[in-house]
Amino acid sequence: MNTLTTPARPSTATPPGARGLLRDTGIVMVRELRPVVRDPFTLIFGMVQPLVFLALFGPLLVGSLGGRAVDTLGGSVWQWFVPAILVMTALFGTSTTGANLLFEFQTGAHERMLVTPLSRPSLLIGRSLKEMVPLAGQAVIIVAVTIPFGFQLHPAGALVGLVLLTVVGVGLGSLSYALAIAVRKQEWMFWGVQQTVIFPLMLLSGMLLPLETGPGWMQVAARFNPLAYVVAAERTLFAGQLVSATVFWGWVAALMTAAVGLTVGVRAMLKSAD
Amino acid sequence: MIRTHALTKDFVVSRTQTVHAVRGISLAIEPGELVAVLGPNGAGKTTTMRMLTTLTTPTSGTATVSGHDVVAEPGQVRRHIGYVGQGNGAGHTQRVRDELNAQGVIYGLDRRAARQRAGELIETLDLTELAARKVSDLSGGQRRRLDVAMGLVHAPSLLFLDEPSTGLDPQNRANLWDHILSMRAAHDMTIVLTTHYMDEADSMAERVVVVDRGEVIADDTAEALKAKLAGDRLVLTAAAGDVDRLARLATGLPGGRDVVVDGTRVQARVGDGPGALPELLRAAGDAGVHVATAQVHRPTLDDVFLSLTGRSLREAENDDPQGSPTDKDVT
């Protein structure tokens, strides 16, 4: 057995404040992404998933809306549907962040992260961002596939749209993390709660089918769903309009989701060891 | 290195039930010590360690670790300590070398230094052939070595080990300890470990803190605890007619006490067994008492625990009256 040759202790001065948070978030994200890169099969499946949905649901949407598509949706069905499917992918990806955590509670891997000097919010943000990185790839594929069918790409709007989605993703991921902590002693509850919450959120956002064709009460309910504002803003952004009231309310909803998510998530984390 | 004052932790289980996992522990641990916290499951060992490592906040009392208060400056404490928990710290989908690199970067090493450090730890802890493996493919003993490597990435001056060898077979336990002790020698580390294996506390630790029901009930070197609280035991057999005389002679030995006669067998506790036995045999010979067999039993820490609490460690594990949820083994 040989002894260690670097007895020098590492610099223990982590930059404080925002720089520290940024650095720690990067570390957490890169660490979470590494197994994905090492095992690209899961990545490939993840990339294909929204395409399957697009291929099977898209034609139904076109069929059921038929000729009304142009007046109801204000343009091509794909123009309406592509931004929504990205929101959906982000919603599914980030809302399951907590599921990985459940296993890490059992093994001790989560405890390991808590005992390191990593800033607490970075654990939430880094994990959520890990779900958002593949999303950028998925967006490219989806756009490439739908352009031949009439989708028009407005690059600036699309990029801002992805940033907006990232902010929402951080909020949703943090809430999922908090949920995992809350149910860590009854793990089966995680999926029950996640499914119960995710479907109303999805349907009441006008993601899959236009809310305009639904009854009045649904439209009222949708006003209380932050995701509805995000979906509307994404559609506007992907149509190339960067500044509008719709986009503004989308940002408000996204930032609020992130703020609430991080607050709840950090509080849950601090209590998670009790 | 560590100072605690009246540290307590209550867990509110329900409106009517509160578990007092730790009840006022005051400890001082100096740099360079190797201290074992020994006690049955549910005694409050793990909860105490979790408070010292900032994983849980004390209900009352104070604790300073490496010069920083665990509640006021948890970040500073985390930077200075190494910790190996009861579970496996590595992510299951991660590879061994990746995980060690990540830990190095987390503790502030730049990428090159982190890679170099990971390489050294891999070699030192016999992980070379496993470096590219996924954590989920490792055996229990291999994972434990990786846990120790992760705890040592930043060459901490203080290392906490929570039940380091639980679930390992004797060979792996011995192997793990070889690694820990050589690291300690190389780095001048202070080590605090919890264990419910008394032989581990006995053979490894220079100081044993015995904890029961959330309180420190004894604190000394293993030798001193055994001499003070248990003492050596002599067991002799003699002819039926000689037993009573032999018992009287045993009572007269230095520190001779608890003399029990059982048929042809005489048992006695003495201060120094190996010294007392020849003396007793000489006295017996002079008195014409014929001793058939003679044995010295050195006491174990279990004897110490028994004499302190009236329960053996094993019994205490089973009745587990104060068992708090986080203090149970997570295996």
Image (cartoon, coloured by chain):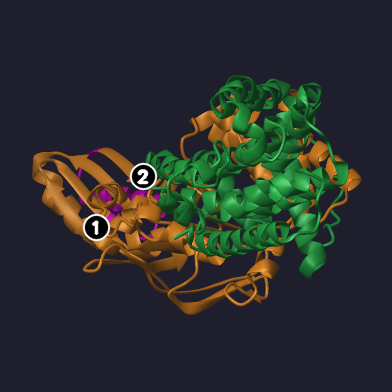
Chain colours: A green, B orange
Which image quarter is the C terminus of chain A in? bottom left
Task: Find residue B73 and report its image quarter.
Answer: bottom right
Is A186 on the left or on the right of A132, as rendered? left
Q: Is residue A226 visible?
A: yes
Please give the residue where the numbered disc 1 appears in the rendered image.
Answer: B321
Q: Residue B196 at x, y = what percent?
A: 41, 49
Q: Amino acid at mark 2?
A: Gln
Q: Residue A222 at x, y = what percent?
A: 50, 53
Which of B290 and B57 lies nearest the eye of the viewer?
B57
The residue carrying pointer 2 sits among few (fewer than 14), some (14 to 19) or many (20 or more) residues within 10 Å by Cα, namely: few
Say which chain tag 1 marks. Answer: B
Say which chain tag 2 marks. Answer: A
The residue carrying pointer 1 sits among few (fewer than 14), some (14 to 19) or many (20 or more) residues within 10 Å by Cα, namely: few
Is B106 on the left or on the right of A263, as rendered? right
- Determine whether the residue tagged by mark 2 lies in a helix, strand or loop: loop
Q: Amino acid at mark 1?
A: Pro
**Which stretch appears magenta?**
B269-292
The residue lying at 70 percent from left, 31 percent from top is A78
Q: Is residue B107 visible?
A: no
- Please, what is the dominant secondary structure of the magenta stretch? helix
**Residue B271 belongs to the span the image colors magenta:** yes
Q: Residue A1 at x, y = what percent?
A: 77, 34
Please give the residue where the numbered disc 2 appears in the rendered image.
Answer: A186
